[in-house]
Amino acid sequence: MQNFVGVGVFRGRVIGPVRHMPAALAEPPVGEKLESSTTPEAAAATIKDAGATVKAQLLERAARAEGAGKEVLEATALMATDPMLIKAAIKLVKTGTSTERAIWEAGESVAETLIKLGGMMAERSHDVLDVKSRIIAVLRGVPAPEIPDSAEPFILVAEDLAPADTATLDPEKVIALVTAGGGPQSHTAIIARALGLPAVVAAAGVSGLVDGGQVFVDGSSGVVSTEPGESEQEAVALWQKQASLLSVFDGSGQLADGTLLPLLANVGGAKDALEAAAANAQGVGLLRTEFCFLGNTTEPSHDDQVAAYKGVFDAFPGQKVVVRTLDAGADKPLPFLTDATEPNPALGVRGYRTDTTTPGVLARQLAAIADAAAQSQTVVWVMAPMISTPAEAADFAAMCQAVDLHTPGVMVEVPSAALTARHLLDHVEFASLGTNDLTQYTMAADRQLGPLATLNDPWQPAVLALIQATVEGAIAQARHSGSLAVEDSQPKPVGVCGESAADPALAVVLAGLGVTSLSMTPRALPAVSAVLRTVTLPQARQLAYRAVAASSAAEARELVRAGLPALAELGL
């Protein structure tokens, strides 16, 4: 038996045959020239047409997808006709380079530029390399490399997976994901959680696994083992038995002592919202409004936006839906809103900041959200991403009040917001911790890079300390404003809507740190609820303090897991 250890990103234990992603398309010969019968103008038109074909193919797949998968496909489709890529290729064909070679060199150059920028822009390099291959496949008249087909369920192994591939996985065929690269917050990890697939990323060496060979995958521990034996088979059988206990959430998030902790869902559209409601989510803690914008070359109309938001609101009458305004920029560029030439887009004009360069889009979106809210029975809260200062929070709150949205809030994604939460909350009614970005910015670690996976871990004590600082900021704001002097009053809510909320052990820590709600993929609701019900609030606080005081993410995780015997009992 040979063991490979990576980062487990979604629970589950399975045994199955390995199937590798097919090899990438062969590189066009260096120096390959246009045929003498083809003019540069005709070659340029061919490249544009091929890019448009790939875009149409991806948008067609997006129309059949949902949730996070739909968003990923729409974002990748935009890259297929991205001016930076297409113009670079056309410039090369005008010097006599063949169309295939031009796209290859342009794609490699653009991807290298994005990788050097780091952060979420490095994440976009995967999209560029993916569409590069797809465009070349169209030019050659051959299929692009796709996830292998098989008569039996299999474990998909790859160096890394393109976002467009992970977005259309069939969980009936692909029973687990294993990649040598990537990180715990990569596209592969996010899609695995959304589909409920056991997954391990950043597992060095797995590319050498024998195709067709049987392996054991433990998505909780991050272990991949060849030649599974009786103990691994027993572990799978035990997991299957335990999994049946983790299939349903009763709609009431609470601790063992009755302390209430609402468990909400992250959604990306009406279909997601209906599934979340069917899973008994207690509302929506994050509505990603990008679903209404991605794939469009122009801003959606007011009526289109109202209809899209109302479709989500109507799934949760009488319950809370927290709307995140458009989080464009960096890894989610939009042609009518963002600047693709920014030297460092991950630290550039994204989220709320786009209102400084393209004023009006945010105000029109807020007006559409307000109209949709007025036509529904939902309790609508609205928050802005990438808020860094109290002045920005005040400006956003004023914009909300102007359209009669009376519960404005902010995303806490950058350290400055966590450290000044007390002042931010002077202007808004709540805060929501986006732990994916908060981890990335705190640790200065690109969430897509496998070698940095140990840094890009929400268990990092520095990240937990910033979460604690945000909650303490809310308490300090309440004391300063005098609201705590009023009987039965509470500090303003501080929730978590990042992927960390879907980790049952980390959910206990978040509860102990004082967060007031957790929002996650609906598939995680039963497991998180089950573990929370095994601890009292004092016990959760004790575990949280141990985690914050730890010297590393690994130590924090080990200390907390040691104090939660229910994890082993439930196979988590």
Image (cartoon, helix red, strand yellow):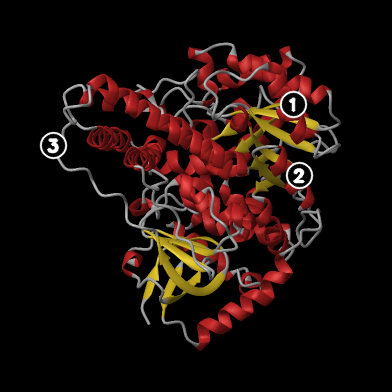
Tag 2 residue: 274
Picture quadrant where residue 257 is located: bottom right
Query: Which disc, if any, is residue 307?
Result: 1
Q: Which residue is nearer to you in this view: 164 or 424?
A: 164
Residue type at the position of mark 2: Leu
Horizontally, residue 409 falls left or right of residue 192, namely: right
Q: Which label's residue is closer to the chain start, 3 or 2? A: 3
Picture quadrant where residue 22 is located: bottom left
Residue type at the position of mark 3: Gly
In this rendering, the count of numbered labels is 3
Neighbor class of circle 3 (other Cα within 10 Å; few <14, some 14-19, many 20+) is few
Residue at the spot 50% in from the left edge and 18% down from the top edge = 336
CA gap, disc 3 and disc 1: 52 Å
Query: Which residue appears farthest toward the left when viewing the image?
Result: 31
Residue at the spot 63% in from the left edge and 37% down from the top edge = 432
Say what secondary structure mark 3 lies in: loop
Residue at the spot 38% in from the left edge and 32% down from the top edge = 50
Horizontally, residue 285 falls left or right of residue 96, namely: right
Q: Is residue 85 above or below residue 139?
A: above
Query: Which residue appears farthest toward the front when viewing the image?
Result: 37
CA gap, disc 1 and disc 2: 15 Å
Q: Which residue is nearer to you in this view: 18 or 399?
A: 18
Query: Which residue appears farthest toward the bottom when viewing the image?
Result: 230
CA gap, disc 3 and disc 2: 53 Å
Residue 379 image offset from top left, x and y in percent: 81, 32
Residue type at the position of mark 1: Ala
